[in-house]
Image (cartoon, rainbow, N blue to C red):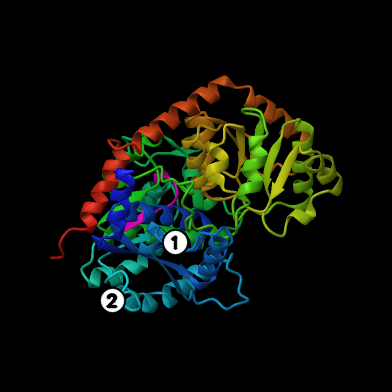
Amino acid sequence: MAAAAAAAADHDAAPRAHALILPYPAQGHVIPLMELAYCLIDRGFAVTFVNTEHNHRRVVAAAAGAGGVQAPGSRARRLRLVAVADGMGDGDDRDNLVRLNAVMEEAIPPQLEPILDGAGGEGQLGKVTCVVVDVGMSWALDAVKRRGLPGAALWAASAAVLAVLLGAQKLIRDGVIDDDGAPLKLENNSFRLSEFTPPMDATFLAWNFMGNRDAERMVFHYLTSSARAAAAKADILLCNSFVELEPAIFTLKSPATILPIGPLRTGQRFAHQVEVVGHFWQTNDDTCLSFLDEQPYGSVVYVAFGSLTIMSPGQLKELALGLEASGHPFLWVVRPGLAGNLPTSFLDATMGQGKGIVVEWAPQEQVLAHPAVGCFVTHCGWNSTVESIRNGVPMLCWPYFTDQFTNQIYICDIWRIGLKMVQTCGEGIVTKEIMVERLKELLLDEGIKERVQRLKEFAETNMSEEGESTSNLNAVVELMTRPMS
């Protein structure tokens, strides 16, 4: 009781600093940066969280549906949600990342200037005193540097991919890739960042896995220029990882040091306190957790492919049949608008009999933490990968593009805590027979279970009071609260 009262009193006190946080406008970026916002609020900060108008509406609507916007008496009073126009029209395709990147860089900076100078927030939270941007939004650091404010940049994927982006110019000079990022000289389908680092699989050249060479070229230039700008202009580079996951990367000092502060807990951390988590869709918390409560330990197959993955109707049907044939209870996240493609017979035979449930969005952190979950069929997004590790859940990997293939190599070949659904990409439809076989193999592999539990323990140690990631996060706080020169 005394500790709770002290925490409440601390949240009522004047904030020690006021951070502006700017994520890249994608689900996998908003959630970890929102969690970083709460980490800072826990340490006495106020936060202005800046989403694009399109995502701001979705985040607020999802949180309101869960009953969690600005609850009186909670630390949410120190969180201000702000929206800026992204430069796209109402009917424009925001999944066209090449165009979105181009227009944002022109449209957003003029809108940040008044926010940085306190417009609309000085009476509530005070003037902005420090900034954290997504590496993909590093052009925003120009305005931060002009004001002499401390600034950090957070990379929302693996530290290895960031290190490769930062080392791209050396790879070009060494003839490993050409000026547009396409591979030229790979030995055994691998390369080295330096003579002191182990070989890295070609999938660590993550931009080359988009399926469109023109898009790959433009994304390569955007990511490498963003990474170089972040390294040059931010006071510190951060990532949602921890030392034991990527030890070779965190020993690199050139061209920039990357500081791990993970695993960030990307979900609702307190059962009694509903917060704005950053989801774009309302989660089916009660439905998911009630179903899991009724299932045996380690029996449930959890299936989720993130916010961007598109699966063909034929593959969607085959996955449904594979889940039915596996005999395991399942919880399957099917994005809004796609559930209508599922076979009626499947819905009647499984959901009608309580064998599984299909939801539009799930509280993934809570699902993976539930003891009934036995494995995670995943697209291998970095957030999902880290969340699965943090909860000790083996993975069946089904990547679709970019760094998801990188993460699959980590999961299956380096950490050895999961299996690949297919051995090579582009194999066409994955049949129900393959799925049943791979699920059985994964759920019976005790070695995988032991290894993922060890990584879970490392994750817990890093985020403990004396852990390395916690120490790094505290160093960030010190940097952000230093007196301005």
- Label 1–label 2 contact, CB within 8 A: no
Quadrant for the N terminus in the image? top left
Which residue is drawn at the image coordinates 45% and 54% (left, top)? 178
In depth, the one of 88 and 219 nearer the eye is 88
Is 153 colored magenta in this rendering? Answer: yes
- The residue wearing badge 2 is 117
Residue extent of the magenta highlight: 152-160
The answer to whether residue 474 is visible is yes
Which residue is drawn at the image coordinates 83% and 48% (left, top)? 343
At label 1, counting other C-alpha atoms closer than 10 Å, the crowd grade (few under 14, some 14-19, many 20 or more) is some
Q: Which tag, 1 or 2, sits closer to the chain's start?
A: 2
In depth, the one of 409 and 188 nearer the eye is 409
Q: Which amino acid, mark 1?
A: His
Pinpoint residue 201: horizontal percent, then vertical percent: 48, 38
Using the image, determine if residue 203 lies above or below residue 49.
above
Residue 74 is drawn in which quadrant? Answer: bottom left
Using the image, determine if residue 406 lies above or below residue 62.
above
Which residue is drawn at the image coordinates 38% and 63% (left, top)? 77
- The residue wearing badge 1 is 221
Quadrant for the C terminus in the image? bottom left
In depth, the one of 30 and 295 nearer the eye is 295
